[in-house]
Image (spheres, helix red, strand yellow):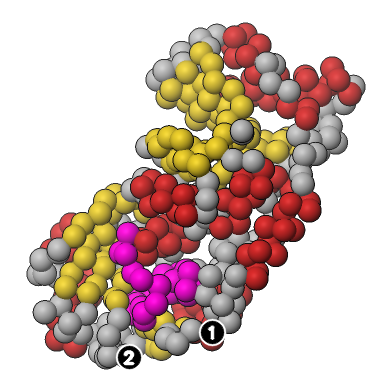
């Protein structure tokens, strides 16, 4: 049975493992950056289409030790890369090297590329071109302490690119991170969510897709595996049809997004429409200082600015104080989850969290904190 690796953001490995098991996939191991699972190709297709938390679904093909360029070149030749694509298609090499004798990752990528294209030249007399923008076959090379792991990328573009988000606000939250935080919050998918600073609407759109059972990859233009010679089109069409049949048409509750920026709200509405969930989300221009509960009970989830990439930290202190005042005085009896990458600003809430998760939003270490408004 083939083995695959689903990568994800740091802090989301455990919920990703649970998600893959819910998809009926056999998890075999867990790693700092993701989860290994065994499956046939139908399971790989299903993981790409349905995983809300994974960044990519990789298929490991080689694992070896190499200290010299000649060793790296000869080890790459052990795997037949010509079985995936035709010689007139394109490839790209993504290399990451740490604490290894060959320290230049560009050199490592070049050496791997040379070995692969030489395979094609020897077999067909022609070689594939390199395309770093939209290749037919992406090869991932990871080296730590001279131990090399080579994998082919079944996803193509990263899975957080759902296809619905064209315009985003400042410091956008990746879709798979938003989905992962929703899972960490243990939200039941059957009750309203309120976001006081919804930006491009990512939290609300991901939540709405969960509740309506819309597969996160259903709006994508395509996946890497669709370019390969072993692509099973009938199997893929079966997986897609099953996903579409499982979708819900309506809900008996809604999602509510507020933001002070009218332009950003317009983008959020467009994103929701492209995702097919605009009918269950209400957006309104409103300051966090004046937001009122749109329903009697629900869950608050907010990703306020951290000061790391947007404006001056001092200017944000009032925003956090307004956030705290609104939650304490207008949303009594509600639970709230706040994502923050700034310890000093989160202290301005002057609230005591009841639960805490550490996650990474890009390179920023963040705290995902639960507050109960008594």
Between 229 and 27, the residue placed more toward the observer is 27
- What segment is highlighted magenta in the picture? 184-211
Image quarter of the N terminus: top right
At 19% across and 88% down in the image, what residue appears? 330
Residue 353 appears in the figure: yes
Q: Identify the mark at residue 196; answer none if there is no mark.
A: none
Up/down of 324 relative to 310, above or below: below
At 86% across and 20% down in the image, what residue appears? 123
Question: Who comes first in sequence, dot 1 or dot 2?
Answer: 1
Q: Position of residue 160 (x, y in %)?
A: 52, 56
Q: Position of residue 215 (x, y in %)?
A: 57, 64
Classify residue 288 by image quadrant: bottom left
Classify residue 95 by image quadrant: top right
Q: Position of residue 32 (x, y in %)?
A: 37, 37
Up/down of 325 relative to 133, above or below: below
Q: Identify the mark at residue 294; answer none if there is no mark.
A: 2
Judging by the rendered image, the residue that carries numbered circle 1 is 250
Number of other residues with Cα within 10 Å of mark 1, as a class: few under 14, some 14 to 19, many 20 or more: few
Count all numbered tags in the image, as a single digit. 2
Q: Position of residue 39 (x, y in %)?
A: 59, 40
Between 218 and 29, the residue placed more toward the observer is 29
Number of other residues with Cα within 10 Å of mark 2, as a class: few under 14, some 14 to 19, many 20 or more: some
At 50% across and 42% down in the image, what residue appears? 26
């Amino acid at each position: 049975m083939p083995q695959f690796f689903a990568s994800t953001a740091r802090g989301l490995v455990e919920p990703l493992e649970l998600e893959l098991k819910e998809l009926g996939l056999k998890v075999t191991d867990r790693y700092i950056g993701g989860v290994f699972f065994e499956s046939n190709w139908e399971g790989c297709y299903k993981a790409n289409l349905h995983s809300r938390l994974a960044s990519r679904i990789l298929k490991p093909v080689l694992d070896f030790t190499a200290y010299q360029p000649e060793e790296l070149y000869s080890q790459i030749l052990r795997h037949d890369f010509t079985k995936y694509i035709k010689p007139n298609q394109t490839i790209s090499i993504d290399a990451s090297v740490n604490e290894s004798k060959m320290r230049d990752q560009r050199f490592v990528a070049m050496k791997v590329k040379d070995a692969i294209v030489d395979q094609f030249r020897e077999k067909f007399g022609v070689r594939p071109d390199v395309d770093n923008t939209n290749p037919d076959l992406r090869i991932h090379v990871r080296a730590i302490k001279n131990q090399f792991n080579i994998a082919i990328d079944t996803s193509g573009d990263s899975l957080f690119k759902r296809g619905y988000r064209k315009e985003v606000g400042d410091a956008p939250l990746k879709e798979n991170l938003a989905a992962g935080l929703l899972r960490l919050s243990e939200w039941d998918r059957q009750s309203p969510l309120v976001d006081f600073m919804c930006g491009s609407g990512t939290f609300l759109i991901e939540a709405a897709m969960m509740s309506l059972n819309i597969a996160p990859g259903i709006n994508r233009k395509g996946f890497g595996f669709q370019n390969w010679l072993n692509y099973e089109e009938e199997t893929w069409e079966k997986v897609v049809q099953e996903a579409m049949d499982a979708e819900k048409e309506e809900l008996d509750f809604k999602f509510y997004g507020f933001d002070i920026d009218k332009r950003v709200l317009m983008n959020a509405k467009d994103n929701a429409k492209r995702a097919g969930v605009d009918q269950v989300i209400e957006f309104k221009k409103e300051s966090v200082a004046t937001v009122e509960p749109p329903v009697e009970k629900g869950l608050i989830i907010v990703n306020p600015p951290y000061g790391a990439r947007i404006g001056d930290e001092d200017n944000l202190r009032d925003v956090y104080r307004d956030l705290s005042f609104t939650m304490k005085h207008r949303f009594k009896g509600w639970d709230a989850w706040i994502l923050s990458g700034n310890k000093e600003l989160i202290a301005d809430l002057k609230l005591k969290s009841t639960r805490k998760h550490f996650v990474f939003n890009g390179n920023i270490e963040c705290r995902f904190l639960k507050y109960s408004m008594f």
